[in-house]
């Protein structure tokens, strides 16, 4: 009986150890599989994070380049605008200077002489109040022939410098004011200036 009991105890121990070993092996395999799954998932997540970071970095780089290019274009445009404003101001100042008394004395008779003699009597010559006051006596002498034909000298309080010629019936209006001449010159010069600035930018 003692022998049988010992055999039973030995069998229980053996079966228990084998069962425990199998259970431990199974748990180990499950743990290894779970760990592998966690590691694989972590690797995928890390790879996704890296890929996203690289994509974001490329986007930020491109956005930075685009912003820099736009800022450069804006700077060039702002510079061009300021230069054009400066050029316009210079043109206006120079045209006003050019329309001094001596210039008006030479220009107005020349313009009227170039007009058709048959239609000159339908014209009014308008000057600024200042210029008319200063030059009226001169023109009455110098333009006595055309004044006798009906040309009239008038003042225009809205005229800064230069002169305008208008038909008496209002059908035609010829603007030789400093403002109009400066505008025409600026319209011609600004595209030329733009070409020069564009060429200078491209050479950088």
Image: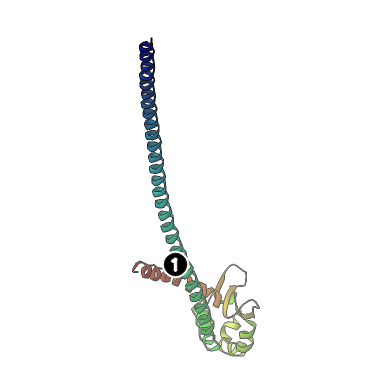
Quadrant the C terminus occupies: bottom left
Question: What is the x, y in percent for residue 199?
Answer: 36, 68
The reply to whether residue 17 is visible in this rendering is: yes
Quadrant the N terminus occupies: top left
Of residues 32 and 150, the one nearer the viewer is 32
Of residues 148 and 33, the one nearer the viewer is 33
Q: Residue furthest top?
A: 1
Name the residue beneath numbered marker 1: 76
Above-or-below relation of 195 to 114: above
Above-or-below relation of 121 to 202: below
Label 1: how many Cα within 10 Å (few below 14, some 14–19, many 20+): some
User: Going 37% across and 32% down the picture, which residue do you hit?
Assistant: 32
Question: What is the x, y in percent for residue 59?
Answer: 42, 51
User: Going 38% across and 13% down the picture, which residue do you hit?
Assistant: 8
Q: Residue furthest left?
A: 203
SS class, disc 1: helix
Of residues 184 and 41, the one nearer the viewer is 41
Question: Is residue 204 toward the left or the right of residue 141 in the image?
Answer: left
Question: What is the x, y in percent for residue 179?
Answer: 55, 75
Question: What is the x, y in percent for residue 86?
Answer: 50, 76
User: Going 49% across and 68% down the picture, which residue do you hit?
Assistant: 78
Above-or-below relation of 55 to 124: above
User: Going 51% across and 84% down the picture, which residue do you hit?
Assistant: 98
Of residues 191 and 31, the one nearer the viewer is 31
Q: Quadrant of residue 123?
A: bottom right
Colour theme: rainbow
């Amino acid at each position: 009986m003692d022998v049988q009991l010992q055999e039973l105890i030995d069998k229980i121990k053996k079966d228990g150890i084998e069962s425990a070993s199998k259970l431990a092996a199974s748990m180990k395999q499950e743990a290894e599989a779970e760990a592998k799954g966690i590691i694989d998932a972590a690797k995928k997540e890390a790879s996704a994070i890296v890929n996203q970071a690289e994509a974001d970095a490329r986007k930020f780089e491109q956005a930075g380049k685009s912003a820099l290019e736009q800022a450069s274009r804006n700077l060039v445009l702002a510079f061009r605008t300021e230069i054009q404003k400066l050029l316009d101001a210079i043109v206006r100042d120079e045209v006003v200077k050019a329309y001094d008394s001596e210039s008006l004395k030479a220009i107005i008779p020349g313009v009227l002489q170039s007009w058709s003699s048959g239609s000159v009597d339908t014209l009014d010559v308008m000057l600024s109040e200042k210029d008319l006051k200063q030059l009226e006596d001169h023109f009455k002498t110098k333009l006595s022939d055309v004044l006798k034909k009906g040309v009239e000298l008038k003042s225009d309080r809205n005229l800064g410098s230069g002169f305008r010629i208008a038909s008496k019936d209002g059908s035609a209006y010829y603007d030789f004011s400093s403002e109009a001449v400066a505008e025409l010159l600026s319209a011609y010069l600004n595209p030329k200036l733009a070409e020069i600035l564009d060429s200078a930018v491209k050479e950088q």
